[in-house]
Image (cartoon, rainbow, N blue to C red):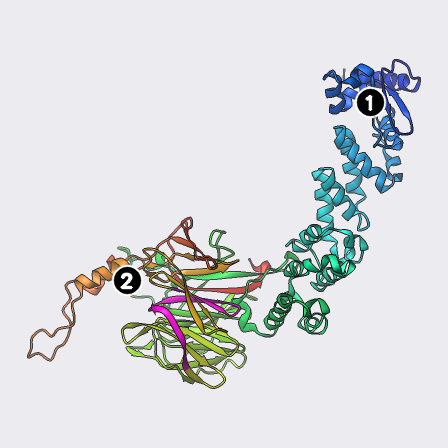
Amino acid sequence: MGEIIGSISDVVYRGIRDLWEQDACTDFEIETAGKTFRCHKVVLAAVSDYFRAMFNSGMKETELNKAKFEDISTDTFETLFSLIYSQNHIEDDHLKQKSEEEMTELLNVAGRLQISFLKDICINHFESTMSTNNCVERWKAGQLFLCDDVREFAWEYILEHFDEIANDDILMTLEFEDILKIISDEKLKVSNEETVWRTIKKWVNTELDKRLEHFVSLLRECRLVAIDKNYLTDKIVFDHLVRKNDEASDMVRDAVRYNCHPSLHGNVELKFRACQKKKISTVVLQKNIDNIKETPETKFMPRVKDLPKIQVKCIQSVYSPWSTWPILTTVEDNIACCTHGNSVYVTGGRKGSLKEFKTSKMKWVSRSDMVAPLTGHTMVATDGYLYVIGGRSGYDPNANVYVWSVEDRGEWRIDGDIMAPVIGASSVALDDKIYIFGGELGRQPADCVQLYDTKTNSGTIFCNLPAPCQWSRALCRGTDAYIVSSCGDVVTVDIEECTSKHIASIPDFDRKNFGVVLKQGKMHIFGGKDLSDTKQLLATSLPLKEPMNSDSEDETPVFAKSLKEINMTEKTAVSDVYIIDVNSGEVKNGAALPVPVEVLGCVNVIHSVALD
């Protein structure tokens, strides 16, 4: 039966073709600038939604049985009718002889006259014959004629073969928006980022007077940090386009500093392309609450000495999926951390342990223990060295600054002293100077910003904070430090100007051990340990220390409730997220985290995507 129907279809098709070739029963004319084609309404209506609508609308073309298309070439209609009436769309090898302009016009006509089979033919042709010589023009044609298939095929080809296309002058004809779209795509595949720089430079210089204003916008999308530092200094730093623009000079200078200074890697916002197989992520050292919860089964078990307590998470943003990295063992909750190059360093614990997380091998490695175990300390990195500052050793505040060489990996040594031995402070490092913010000094919150100079091994007071700050998180962008205190104050310190400024206040914020991420001017403050209930309980349950009686030498304090009871009442973690615009000071509530998180440390690190 199927064969019979197929035979009937062939008979009908051959009959229509014969009628057209003999100019028999034709009832419609299409007039172009060079020729008039006679055809059949029923055939046009069968293949074109455009003509079907025309014939059913009572338009004048229907009454006159004629339509004019002076802007469509005669050759295009000859090809179209050849495909319709001669079944050549089944064997369309002759289309390969068509020029790029002719095929582009066929695509235009297919969309304009709503001829789906012709559109499919054009799409298949463009996909099978895509090359470095035509992909840019086809991408533009797909945009112009609203053909998503052609546009997407061409776009993927451009991204995949940019190294070859970059040498073609066709890129120089693109508008600013188009060249920006190409070089800003994370999936752009290049053998090295120098190719992107050369493309930007060539495009701008092609019409310097008109395009110079776009240079900085394009340079922002060049991954300068992925360029070899010798190429940066030899070819880019002194380029005339860079030297004449302060912002461009700053970007190139920062890229050179990044390449030369591994201590800066955690303090810059970086973008890498997929082909570079790197990314910068935020590493969150999270208290492993589930592991330390007391259960009936574990209540009377002996304490496990090396009980793992710190989970390690890798995030791209607060709301992106959190990847789990190897857990950190043998270090207690009170830690300090920083990054140097592609490694994360953590100090803390009863032994003053130093742990290095090597992202190249995805594992923790033990390094030299500190001279004396500390709690409430802060840690930063300068080029080649780690510094531990402040905190307390036992009950005694620590004024010493300890240093450890990343290259030599020897013993910790005392490098110098800070002026005020603070506990619970935060810090950042810029070049060879370390800035320490607030902290607890003599049981009172401090309002000073201390400066420790690693070259002179001396500490001074740098400036004052707008208000005392007992516990905080700090991070650095450029020459600005951003500090978030446990009471919700957000402050910026301009390190070049030696000034501090209050940015915002988070309402009803009273916590510590929260995480801070800053990207594109937005600061996300997430999780933490709520302190409000604990303070209230301490105020009502822990009176000042008094002796049992005036004659007794026993000065053991008397508590209304035991410390164990207080710790059991204390909240462990919260899931709130606050979003702060560091430019306007606007504070918003973000969506809560899926689970409460107590953040013991939070740093940025560069790592390989293959290890995710």
Query: Nearer the observer, disc 1 or disc 2?
Result: 1
Q: Dots 1 and 2: beta carbons under 8 Å?
A: no
Q: Decide: few, some or many residues near mark 1? Use Cα within 10 Å; few <14, some 14-19, many ≥20.
A: some
For the C terminus, give its image quadrant: bottom right
Q: What element carries label 2?
A: loop
Q: Where is residue 251 in the image (x, y as percent from the top left)?
A: 62, 67
Q: Name the residue under label 2.
A: 301
569 left or right, relative to 166: left
The amino acid type, in three-letter code, at marker 2 is Met
- Span shown in magenta: 460-484
78 left or right, relative to 146: right
**Image point 41% across, 51% down: which residue?**
588
Give the mark nearer the N terminus: 1 vs 2: 1
Depicted 437 relative to depicted 573: above or below = below
The amino acid type, in three-letter code, at marker 1 is Ala
Q: Position of residue 116 (x, y in %)?
A: 75, 29
Indicate the quadrant where residue 569 lies.
Answer: bottom left
510 left or right, relative to 497: left
300 vs 185, nearest the viewer: 185
Q: What element carries label 1?
A: strand
- Identity of the residue furthest to the top in this view: 25
Q: Name the residue under label 1.
A: 67
**Image point 71% across, 66% down: which residue?**
241
Q: Position of residue 238 (x, y in %)?
A: 70, 72
